[in-house]
Amino acid sequence: MNYTLNDISTTLDEMISHEFFIEDSLRDMLKTFKKEKDSIGYPFGALCVLHYKEYADEFDAEIYKVAAAIELLVLSFDIIDDLQDNDTDHVWVETPKFSLNSVLAMLVIAFKVLRQSHFVHKEQAMQIIEKHTLLSISGQQLDLLNVYKDERSYLKMIEQKSGSLTSMSCLVGEVLARGKKSLEVEDYAKAIGIIGQIKNDIQDLEEWNQKNDIVNKRYSLPIIFLLSMGSGFSKDLEKYYHGNESIELDEAIIKKELQESGAIRYAIAVKNLYKKRALNTIEKIGMSLEGKESLQILMK
């Protein structure tokens, strides 16, 4: 897996350096953002390569270009997400107007790379990318509306926002390898995306900063659980969410309630249900041991 990540990183560097039509300061910004991405990793590109290897009769190293293009797409979405939420300290939030230009450049470069690839089934892959990116953007729109206050609708929203990107990555690798996609791959890939989002939801509540969903009056599974309890604390929290300025938040009390109420355990339990479902599907399709182990790491 580390070998794959290094190949994707190197390919991204080459894509940015060799793009003739971008101005030098924009190129430098893309390099800076890509360097920031190095610390985050390249799970989407890795999923693409993994599924290509799983189904291809012969390995074609050009898959690393496709994987890098997918990572560029996902990075562009991450930047837009962070600019909209304003809840991160990544370098791209420092100069929003220039970052938006970089996002446009990333999108064009990514689709250019995909269009110019020599894979026989690249048109099918492009259709998958178009569909799933639009689904993810729609999910982000729903997330920004911040109106999903029950488990079912919230999970459906993150399936669109996060699950669409993981399923896109897996399906592109599969389609480029054999010219068709499978419902089983799409199903467990969505689950992997949902698992990742739930993990992020839990982590965001551990720190009392601009990423904390309670501070920002945003909903996630642990918060939905807290608000549904009917306790004095949950009623005060609901008043806070509805704009009652007399309600003051206490970090220590909130962290205690998250643990003692079972809110965190509940979110972990939901995550584990998706993990079990994904693992069952992976077993059914007879994936290689290397592939299964790589996917299990993503679902920890």
Image: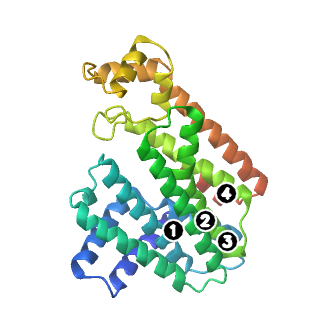
Above or below, 86 relative to 148? below
Badge nearest the viewer, 1 or 3: 3
Q: CA distance from mark 1 to mark 3?
A: 19 Å
Q: Earlier in the sequence, mark 2 or mark 3?
A: 2
User: Where is residue 279 shown, x and y percent of the image?
Assistant: 68, 47
Q: Residue at x 61, y 71 (%)?
A: 127
Q: Which residue is mark 1?
A: 4
User: Where is residue 133 shown, x and y percent of the image?
Assistant: 52, 62
Q: Which mark is residue 50?
A: 2
Q: Which residue is mark 4?
A: 186
Q: Amino acid at mark 4?
A: Glu
Above or below, 137 relative to 29? above
Q: Residues within 10 Å of mark 1 (few under 14, many from 20)?
A: some
Q: Amino acid at mark 1?
A: Thr
Contact (Cβ within 8 Å) of mark 2 with mark 1? yes
Q: Residue furthest top?
A: 232
Left or right: where 101 falls relative to 222: left
Left or right: where 250 falls relative to 129: left
Q: Which mark is residue 211?
A: none
Q: Residue at x 33, y 36 (%)?
A: 216
Residue in front for this viewpoint, 215 or 296: 215
The answer, for residue 228, to whether it is visible in the render is yes
